[in-house]
Amino acid sequence: MQSQYPARRLPLYLTAAYTLLTIYACLYPLDGWRDIGDSPFAFLVAPWPRYSTGLDLVLNIIGYFPLGFVAAASLRGTYRTGRVIFTVTLACALLSLCLETAQNYLPTRVASNLDLATNTIGALAGAWAGVRWGEIFERHGILERWRQRRILHGHIGELGLILIALWWLTQLEPTNVLFGTGDLRPLFDLPAQMAFSARRYIALEAAIVAVQMLALGLVARRCMREPAPWLLIFIILAGLGIKMLATSVFVTPPEPWQWASPGAMRGLLAGSAILAIAWRLPGWLQHSLACLALLCATALVNLAPQNPFELAGMRLIGEGHFLNFHGVTRVVASLWPFMALMYLTAQGALAARR
C-alpha cells in the first residue's frame, strides 16, 4: 500500500481544491452576516421547503458527487471498501451540515434539511463510484500512466494539472472577455479605467486574448515533460467549448458564439502565431516570458472598459444555484493569474535547488 501513496496525491489535491470551492459557493457572497436570534439547527426539523424544485435536488446531488468521488479515490486501497464509503460520506455530510448551518447567518441564503440530505446522497454515490473506478488515479491506472508519460513528476506536475483544470473553470464565467482572467474590479467594486470606444475596445480585446493565450500556453508547457502541441491544442479547444457552453446555458438569450467577436478572433490568430514561436525558446526564457505575459494580461484586463452593447444584449439567468456557481467562477477567474505566478515561482525555486 505504501508504494501506491504517491499516485494518490492528485485525488487528494483535487479533494482539497473542490472542498474550498464548495465552501465558497455555499457561503457566497460572504457578506451581510447577521444574528438570527434562534437555534441555528432549527432547519433540521423544518417542513419540506416550499420553493424547492426537482432541478434543485439534482444539482445538489451532482454538486457533491465529485467531492465524494475524489475523496474516496484518495483513500481507495488504504481501508476496506465499506469503511472508505462510510468515512467519506460522513465527512461530506458534516461539511454540508456546517455550511447549511452557516447559511442561517447570511440574508441571501436559506438553510435546508433537504439540501443536506441530497448533498449526502450525492457524496454517497460519489464515494461508491470513487471506490469502484478510482483506480484511474493509481500507479497502473490510465490517468496515472498518461501523467507519467506527459506531465512533470511529483507535486509540481500534479499542481500544474489542477491549475489547468481551474483555468477551464474560469471559462464558465460568461461575461468575461475570451480567456480573460485576473480582473480584480468585481472583487473590489472598482470602476473601469477607460471610457468605451469601439476601436479601442477591439484592439484591447485582441491584445488580451493574444497575451492570455501566450500565458496559458507557456504555463501548460512548463507542466509538461516534453513539448506536446496536440495537448495544448486540446486545452485551448476545450476552453473554447466551455466558453460556448457558458454563453449558451448561463445567459439569456443564449449566444453560443458570443465570444467570437472581431477582437477575440484577431487575438486568437495573433496569440497562436506568438505561441508557436515561444514554444521553441529555451526553458528558462519560456518561464520568464510566461510570468511577463501573466502580468501584462492582468494589467490589460483591468484597464479594459466594459462593452455596453454586449451587456445590453444579454443578461445572466437568475436561478439561485447558478448565482452561487457564478460567484465561484468569478473569484477563480480573478485569482487565476496570481495562482499561476505562484506556481511558476515554486517551479523556479525547485529548479534552483537542483
Image (spheres, grey):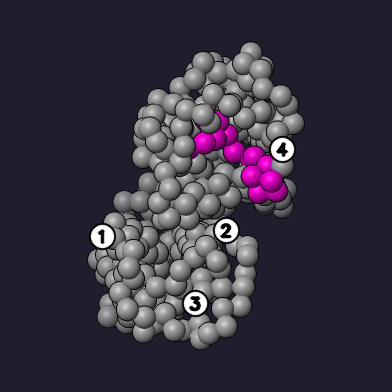
Mark 1 burial class by Cα count in 10 Å: few <14, some 14-19, many 20+:
few
Marked residue nearer the N-terminal end (1 or 2): 2
Disc 3 residue type? Thr
The residue labelled by disc 3 is 101
- Image quadrant in which you'd find residue 117: bottom left
**Nearer to the camera, 325 or 320:** 320
The residue labelled by disc 1 is 54
Distance in Å between CA atoms under marks 1 and 2:
24 Å
Residue at 42% x, 38% y is 251
Image quarter where the N terminus lies is bottom left
Disc 4 residue type? Pro
The residue labelled by disc 2 is 29
| Horizontal side, residue 348 vs residue 169: left or right | right
Whether label 2 touches label 3, CB < 8 Å: no
Distance in Å between CA atoms under marks 1 and 3:
23 Å
Mark 4 burial class by Cα count in 10 Å: few <14, some 14-19, many 20+:
few
Magenta stretch bounds: 174-189
Distance in Å between CA atoms under marks 4 and 1:
39 Å
Where residue 9 appears, x then y in whole percent?
A: 47, 63
Residue at 47% x, 45% y is 169
Disc 4 is placed on an element classified as: loop
Whether label 1 touches label 2, CB < 8 Å: no
Mark 2 burial class by Cα count in 10 Å: few <14, some 14-19, many 20+:
some
- Image quadrant in which you'd find residue 116: bottom left
